Image: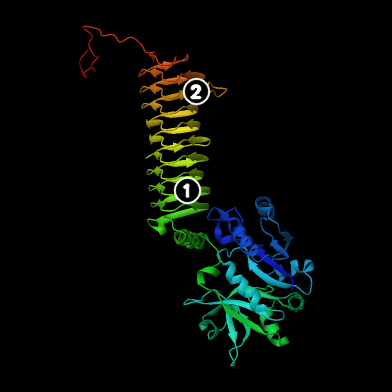
Amino acid sequence: MSLHIVILAAGQGKRMNSALPKVLQPLGDRPLLKHVVEAAQTLDPDRIHVVYGHGGEAVQSALGYLDVNWVHQAEQLGTGHAVAQAMDAIPDDARVLVLYGDVPLVRAATLSHLVTAAGGDKLALLTVVLDNPAGYGRVLRNDDNRVVGIVEDKDANREQRHIQETNTGLLCAQARHLRDWLARLTNTNAQGEYYLTDCIALAAVDGVPVVAGQAGTAAETQGINNKLDLSRAERLYQRRQAETLMAQGLTLRDPDRFDLRGSLRAGRDTTIDVNVVIEGEVVLGDGVTIGPNCVLRHCTIEDHTQIASHTVIEHATVGARCQIGPFARLRPDTRVADRAKIGNFVETKKTDVGEGSKINHLSYVGDTRVGRDVNIGAGVITCNYDGANKHVTRIGDGAFIGSDCQLVAPVTVERGATVGAGTTLTRNAPADKLTVGRARQTTIDGWQRPKKHTPGHQ
């Protein structure tokens, strides 16, 4: 039996107080809707249908690359009406799984169990028991404990509001049944909408078995309605990722202070300290140590390298047994070879740093090719920009650049050359020689420092 998945994503999300449509709000740096689509894809369905409405152009613009059938709901008349918009593209003999674009934490295993429970001719409903069920639809059962319906919170009487088993909204049923039930829905309720949940009562009337399955955790079925919900879901999502990584062998000093906003692959005996943010695709080798308060974005760090605190590395590669930071910034297209050192308050950009080379303190090195075993002193700047174009600086193997030098590109420091401290280098420095370019020091006898005038005195 084929499987079609319908994801409802047409809600406006007024309580978000945001110009961004609710289903595009970020969770782990990815839109809520993308999380749901990815979970749906694990079931290998025949087709995924996304019903969109408010902010439809923005939603399609952001996620138009997804392999889904986009279904427009021009008027938002309730969840039942929303599902009905997708039914024309679904054959009668298919099973239909209904998901929500603002319920991003549901696990693939839970969805698989729900589809299996529906079988060929049942309605499977996902429920959860809550200590405080206020605001949620209550699951109604008869004296035989069989599910006979759902009553929304606004329509529930006093007795029904004491029921703690609540509806998550996620269900699976055969398309021919669902199509019939949707056609029979009415909007005679407190909100004047066509409720998908009314299909449960219709199933009971028609003698279609209703199977209620429990979600693994209440967090799985948490809907995102406001920024507070979003922040809680973020921590749940990050904790889930942290636990997965720790099960694979990664050491996290405090999993509650860790944020993965992309993908991370880490080798053995690698440790990440607190408040580290991982963005994009990041690969860490064996024995890597990441200090506190670092940001790693689209980068690779090889075996036994130490990244000290407050370091930012983006679109860069770092070799093995390097020392980076603290307070270093490796900008895009930085490539650091093995055993190199990038120290505190050093910034690099579009730069190759050769094996064993050192840039220890307070330097900017951009558009530069640094050879092996080079020492670059404190306060060195490669002047790579002339106001219109960028130019390259080349520093040969074994060169020594003294403190507070400016290397005005394009310029080459040849192999084994030494550039004296305070030099402004505008021409190439020859190999194995000392090059110095600074103003002659002069002492003026009898000079007196100016003094401030005292009020009332000339």
Identify which residue, 453 or 307, lies in the foreground.
307
Any part of residue 189 in sight: no
Q: Mark 2: which secondary structure? A: strand
Identify which residue, 23 or 390, lies in the foreground.
390
Answer with mark 2 or mark 1, whichever residue precedes in sequence.
1
Coordinates of residue 323 in the picture (x, y in percent): 39, 39
Quarter of the image for the C terminus: give it. Answer: top left
Coordinates of residue 411 in the picture (x, y in percent): 49, 18
Q: Residue drawn at (71%, 72%), measured in percent from left and top?
A: 96
Report the residue marked by disc 1.
284
The answer to which image quadrant residue 136 occupies is bottom right
Q: Give above or below for 269 relative to 117.
A: above
Q: Residues within 10 Å of mark 1 (few under 14, many from 20)?
A: many
Q: Is residue 262 left or right of residue 405?
A: right
Q: Residues within 10 Å of mark 2 (few under 14, many from 20)?
A: many
Q: Residue drawn at (41%, 53%), measured in percent from left and top?
A: 269
Q: Mark 1: which secondary structure? A: strand
Report the residue marked by disc 2.
393
Task: Tell me the amino acid under the disc marked 2.
Answer: Thr
Q: Are marks 2 and 1 in contact (CB under 8 Å)?
A: no
Coordinates of residue 431 in the picture (x, y in percent): 43, 16
Task: Tell me the amino acid under the disc marked 1.
Answer: Leu
Q: Is residue 363 left or right of residue 369?
A: left
